[in-house]
Amino acid sequence: MLSRAACSTSRRLLPALGSLGSRQKHSLPDLSYDYGALEPHINAQIMQLHHSKHHAAYVNNLNTAEEKYQEALAKGDVTTQIALQPALKFNGGGHINHSIFWTNLSPNGGGEPKGELLEAIKRDFGSFEKFKEKLTTLSVGVQGSGWGWLGFDKELGCLRIVACPNQDPLQGTTGLIPLLGIDVWEHAYYLQYKNVRPDYLKAIWNVINWENVTARYTACKK
């Protein structure tokens, strides 16, 4: 079960830039399942490349950007600090987003959520099927690369569906707390589904880890 820290994923993975002097390097998180565990919906080759190459690259580039930022802070070099913001946002977002994504998936996933989360989905979207259709349609329509998200609006106390371009982190750019993220970068599906993104999105619902999504929702309401 997730702790309340699940509500502040981005704050844990991207410490305040002013505290980089004592920061620890980010590392690639282990998966709780084998690369082939999500087959036939997402094949092992995709999972291995996605996790060990793409996510690892975000982690390595984030560490490099933070090191350069730390050096710029020490020198009082504001120009370099500003120039590094896109790299911090892109690679930091990539690390945050994928760290959530892996836990949102499970070989024992699929079906529908239960309890409080299901009731919230029905309240805010009418039914689970309407929610599923809306998030799928939004994700299919992302231009280029990005993510489809189910997030929690803590201020309004409701669920919201939004799309984020590239690797923009949901909480850091919209204020919404991430519950469920669907990666629609081509590296997440191309080797299996080619350019047919709708087929990938149809398949991914079979491995959504609703226990994880529910735990995130419960934690964020405390």
Image (cartoon, grey):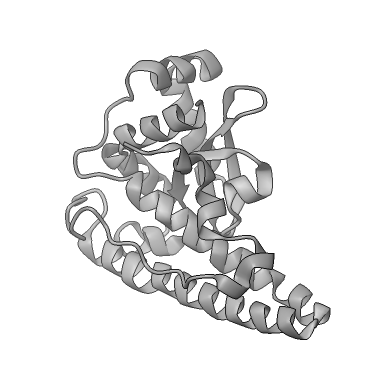
Above or below residue 9? Residue 17 is below
Nearest to the observer: residue 145 or residue 87: 87
The extreme front residue here reads 22
Q: Quadrant of residue 18?
A: bottom right
Quadrant holding the N terminus: top left
> Can you give x and y, in whole percent of width and height, for residue 138 in the image?
55, 39
Q: Residue at x 46, y 77 (%)?
A: 60
> Can you give x and y, in whole percent of width and height, for residue 26 in the image?
45, 69
Can you see residue 196? no
Nearest to the observer: residue 35 or residue 4: 4
Can you see residue 29? yes
> Can you give x and y, in whole percent of width and height, for residue 207 in the image?
27, 41
Nearest to the observer: residue 27 or residue 170: 27
Q: Residue at x 40, y 50 (%)?
A: 101
34 with respect to 130 (left or right): left
Above or below residue 80? Residue 22 is above
Above or below residue 66? Residue 128 is above
